[in-house]
Image: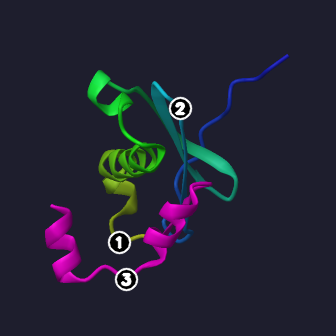
Amino acid sequence: MSTTPVLALPDFSQPFILETDVSQKAMGTVLMQQGRPIAFLSQALGPKNQGFSIYEKELLSFITAVSMWRHYLLGSHFIIKTDQQSLKYLIEQKITIVTAKVAH
C-alpha cells in the first residue's frame, strides 16, 4: 500500500535540495528540505528535447526547476543533487560574468 506524500512548508533558514531525474521522454524534479518534499515537478519532453543528450536533459530539468521555484530559491542556499557526472563538474564551477553571458 502506498501513501500520498504530505508536502512540507518551506523553512527559509534551511537549505533547499533540488533532485532531478530524466528519461528519454520526461523529466521529474522534487524540491525538498530535510528529506521532506515541498514541491514536485514533472514534465513530458517535446520531440526537440527528446533528441538532447542525457547531459542536456539533466541541465534542462535543473533550469526548468530553478525557474519554476525561483520564489523559494532566490536569496536562499540550495543544493542540486544529480547522478550525472559531467553536470557535477559544471555545478562545482564558479560562474563569472563572461560565462553567464555566454550561457544566455
* Tag 1 near tag 3, CB within 8 Å: no
- Residue at x 30%, y 50% (from the top left corner): 67
Q: Is residue 96 magenta?
A: yes
**Figure quadrant of the C terminus:** bottom left
Query: Which of labels 1 and 3 is toward the front?
Result: 3
Q: Is residue 49 above or below residue 72?
A: above
Amino acid type, residue under disc 2 in the picture: Ser
Amino acid type, residue under disc 1 in the picture: Gly
Q: Is residue 23 magenta?
A: no
- Earlier-in-chain disc, 1 versus 3: 1
- Span of residues in magenta: 78-104
Image-quadrant location for residue 51: top left
Alpha carbon separation for disc pair 1 and 3 = 17 Å
Between residue 22 and residue 29, name the one nearer to us: 22
Of the numbered discs in the image, which one, if any, rests on residue 75? 1
Check disc 1 and report its element: helix, strand or loop: loop
Residue matched to label 3 = 94
